[in-house]
Amino acid sequence: MASIPYGRQTVEAEDEAAVLAVLRSDFLTTGPMVERFETGFAAFVGASCAVAVSSGTAALHLAMLSLDLTPGDEVIVPPLTFVATANAVLYAGGTPVFADIDPDTLLIDPAAAAAQIGPRTRAIVGVDYAGQPCDWAALKALAVRHDLVLIADACHAPGGADRGRPVGTLADLSTFSFHPVKHLTTGEGGLIVTDDPDRAARLKRLRNHGIDKDHRRRAQAADHRYDVVELGFNYRLTDLQCALGLAQLGRLPAWLARRRTLAARYERTFQNHPSVRPLARRGEAEHAWHLFVVRCTGPLQGRRDALFAALRDRGIGTAVHYPPVHLTRLYRERLGTGPGLCPVAEAAYEEILSLPIFPGLGEADQDRVTQAVDEIARLS
Ligand SMILES: *Cc1c(COP(=O)(O)O)cnc(C)c1O
């Protein structure tokens, strides 16, 4: 039997045709597809400005750079996230400060974030873990009260919403990733959305070495001169990749619907299940279901790694999202973090497992997953 991965991209004939057309055109990197993809993605999330970059990590890095942090400035982040969320703060010369998560949703706890705000706090990052939007209204209130920038690491949640407002419009800056396991792919890729055109212009400059005009603008102005006004990077996304992203974007609504159908099937199967329990949902939020995370309980309590291994033996791929960032060696050594700092995240980490969910997952394959979980639980 073929093995089932925990996540997988969908690439179809129209994607291939879109990329091939660019390959045969004049522009392989910065060309017309970049702006078309940016405009399309901004429209999808309801934001006014978008800046496409080479990865989700680059998006977070530039978002942090745009804060102009000085040494000692702090940015509040949750511990249960991909390490790039916190690394971006370090790249930009700031100090990540960890605020623990809610024990039921595993989203950053606004009260824990409030407790970490101090004189050097500059920003709060919310991560829409698994695709479920954070309590953005509470985070926004904190940001306004303390004059902080609010950043959404929305890499899991394009298409999600909080209280009817789409992810991408809930923070000052929202970052996305187009890695193949995410909702849509450009191979590697990322993007930042904001409603502030000045911030967007700065981010575009930072993705291109800090140069004041890109080559197309120079060509249009028939002027070879340019200046470098700050230290930037080459974080450009290519036209080839943007063509792929734009082709994928058209099918994103259908893919989201498919993820929601699969999640609803898992939730039906696992509600009141003796061994695995889905994460709690926020009633006000529209989930985008990047991941379907369950917690081991009952006979599987403390046996998450056994479940992982037994599923793997049955050809079913799962993953653990994520080792808490503050427990990694880098953070222990750099910041002196360690066990006990975020007890809720530390306890959750021992219990969580992400089951397969992606648009191409068939219902028969999903049933294979749930039957395998049942069987493993019975044998435990
Ligand atoms: C995927 C991801 C990133 C990083 O994105 P890349 O495109 O892989 O660089 C950052 N944060 C979260 C929460 C992610 O899931």
Image (cartoon, grey):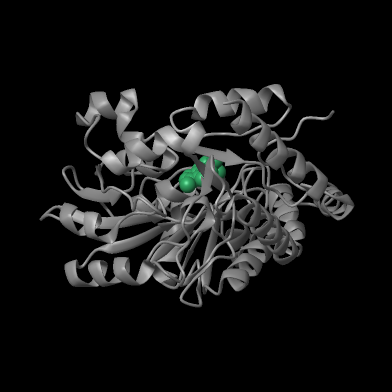
Q: State the residue in front, 278 or 241.
A: 278
Q: In the image, residue 99 lies at what x, y percent?
A: 26, 48
Q: In the image, residue 368 lies at what x, y percent?
A: 76, 39
In the rendered structure, the answer to whether residue 358 lies left or right of residue 206 reads: right
Query: Which residue, as the protein is rendered here, is positioned at the far bottom?
Result: 164
Image quadrant occupied by the C terminus: top right
Q: Who's the residue at 60% across and 47% down the image?
A: 189
Question: Residue 45: in sight, yes or no?
Answer: yes
Question: Residue 91: in sight, yes or no?
Answer: no
Q: Who's the residue at 31% across and 38% down the image?
A: 90
Q: Who's the residue at 73% across and 45% down the image?
A: 9
Q: In the image, residue 118 lies at what x, y percent?
A: 12, 54
**Residue 9, placed above or below residue 174:** above
**Residue 133, placed above or below residue 275:** below
What is the quadrant of residue 317 in the picture?
Answer: top right
Q: Who's the residue at 41% across and 50% down the image?
A: 62
